[in-house]
Amino acid sequence: MRGTMMDFPLTLPTLLDRAGRLFPRVEIVSRRPDLSIHRSNYGEFHRRARRLASALTKLGLQPGDRVLLYTDGVFEAMNAAQVEYSKPRLEKFLAANTDLSADKFANALLDDVNVWSDDPNGRSQDDDITLVVLDIDTPNQAPV
């Protein structure tokens, strides 16, 4: 993807990399679940993201690999027959959906779990579900 004013793609990794290198002291403010405020900056975010990338590389991950982090609410979701979604079913879903982008994969997995746990008697999935999908890409070399 090339624009008329940029010679690099306007993707989230590119933007965050540039923010970390060019504006390291700009503050990032977020609110935690307990309603407390957490303060950081783009420089710290950039350092932590690079440490994560380095750790994943040391584990042997390569471009094209996908990492799925999830809570137990995914594989413990029960259907009307009280059968869990299960880790083997999750692994099968992973293998069958490698062609989806990270966001489409996450949405498709949530849809699959919701369809699995849909109960005609009104019982619904009652455990929390958190997903993080990381696709390992080649590093972007954005200009300074």
Image (cartoon, helix red, strand yellow):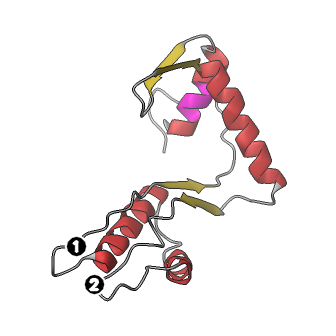
State the residue position of label 2: 80
Numbered disc 1: secondary structure = loop
Q: Which residues are magenta?
A: 14-18
Whether 21 is drawn above or below 79: the answer is above
**Badge 2: residue crowd in 10 Å (few <14, some 14–19, many ≥20):** some
Q: Find residue 62 and report its horizontal and vertical position in percent.
A: 74, 59
Q: Is residue 13 above or below residue 21?
A: below
Residue 7 visible in the shown view: no
Q: Which residue reaches farthest right?
A: 58
For the residues bearing labels 2 and 1, Cβ distance under 8 angstroms: yes
- Judging depth in this view, the residue of 138 and 70 nearest the camera is 70
Q: Residue 54: image x %, image y %? A: 78, 44
Q: Is residue 133 magenta?
A: no
Q: Residue at x 31, y 71 (%)?
A: 114
Q: Given the current orientation, which residue lies at the most extreme bottom position?
A: 81
Looking at the rendered structure, the secondary structure element under dot 2 is loop
Is the magenta region chiefly helix, strand or loop? helix
Q: Looking at this view, is 89 or 72 the one in front?
A: 72
Q: Distance between the Cα atoms at labels 2 and 1?
A: 8 Å
Please, what is the three-letter code of the amino acid marked with disc 1?
Arg
| Residue 43 appears in view | yes
Residue 123, disc: 1
Q: Which is nearer the eye, 125 or 103?
A: 125
Quarter the C terminus occupies: top right
User: Who's the residue at 57% across and 38% down the image?
Assistant: 13
Residue type at mark 2 is Ala
Disc tally is 2
Q: Quadrant of residue 111?
A: bottom left
Give coordinates of residue 94: x percent, y percent.
53, 74
**Is residue 89 shown left or right of residue 79?**
right
Residue 108 shown left or right of residue 101 in the figure? left
